[in-house]
Amino acid sequence: MADNQQKNIFRYDFWLLLGSFIALAFGLLILASASMGISLHQYHNSLHFFYRQVIFIGAGIIISITLLRTPILFWEKIGGYLLLLVMLLLVIVLIPGIGKHINGSIRWIGVGPLTLQVSELAKFGVVVYLAGYLVRREDEVQTSVEGFFKPLIILGLISVLLLLEPDFGAMVVIMLTMLGMIFLAKARLWQFLVLFAGVMALMWILAISSPYRVMRMTSFLNPWASQYDSGYQLSQSLIAFGRGGIFGVGLGNGIQKLFYLPEVHTDFLFAVLAEELGIVGQIFVLGLFSCIVARALYIGRLAERAEYIFASYLAYGLGLLLAVQVIVNVGVNIGVLPTKGLTLPLMSYGGSSIIFSCAIIAVLLRIHHEVTADN
């Protein structure tokens, strides 16, 4: 009996944990290669960003250990308060003198040497809140129009605040994740079709009222037509993919990271990977993320079968959040989506991104622990 109790102290999803650690380690390796040039140029230390990323990962692991000991019931109770905090911070970051301007955007709140990218907290907070909403209003979501559109009002408010920063990439990730969670809650299909028609109509109005803005949004369709203007980042990214071929030019031997491709250590880390490790490296990373997302969805399914409804929606939402962010980041890098700033989870440089990515994995592991320990 004592041995069985000892074994049940903490059960975890081995493959999720292993995949996450490999992603962190592999991302650190690629980041070191991608950031050497810009680190040396800006800070006279070729490993400046590498050392900072190690600190971020350490902080993420410490926070994750705390979250592993936090019951899932805690998140269900604070979902509404967390959403209010997110909304408040999204407003505060827009106040002059508080929000930090970086590359033309106001997405960060600084506290001494520390900065918080509010949109990262917003992604996590919205998933926690919506999971609770779908539990409380499950019948309403499945049977009435009001239940479907109520969370979309919150989505609209958050989207407006994110566009004011501007952070279009985070808005897209949150929108697709929320719609995915509502779809999994078995909302009626015709409601999604009506919403899609409304979005298409809005885009058509935008095209009529501001052709220049639409031209900038669609420049990714032919970046070579403006390769020294709005298509510059994408054209340089595509050059990196072309140079990489099947096996790449070798780790550390890439050229595009040497001041040709902007944001190589954040938004375009995947392009550096493609140049240096080729298609083989791309398949490895995409396979790694596929494993992580598949385990997240599997944990959600386990929770659903065990009738842990909030935990199942939370796991599904976090899995979708990771999947959408990877798809958008890679899509931007290969030119099938408009160029917008969005990091690659667990790999790109950034304290907020790394910490919240680790937090997502920790919450998923906690769900797996609670479901398997009680069944």
Image (cartoon, helix red, strand yellow):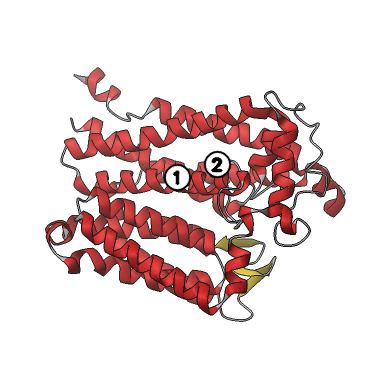
The image shows residue 186, relative to residue 27, as above or below, that is: below
* Residue situated in front as seen by the camera: 188 or 93: 188
What type is the residue that disc 1 sits on? Leu
Q: Is residue 194 left or right of residue 224?
A: left
Residue farthest along the bottom direction in this orientation: 96
* Residue situated in front as seen by the camera: 124 or 68: 124
Residue 108 visible somewhere in the drawing? no
Q: Is residue 310 left or right of residue 144?
A: right
In x, y percent, where is residue 247? 69, 23
**For numbered disc 2, what is the local secondary structure?**
loop
What type is the residue that disc 2 sits on? Leu
Q: Read off the residue under disc 1.
A: 322
Q: Which residue is found at the position 56% from the left and 48% from the top?
A: 336
Q: Which residue is found at the position 60% from the left and 76% from the top?
A: 98
Residue 135 visible somewhere in the drawing? yes
In the picture, the quarter occupied by the N terminus is top left
**For numbered disc 1, what is the local secondary structure?**
helix
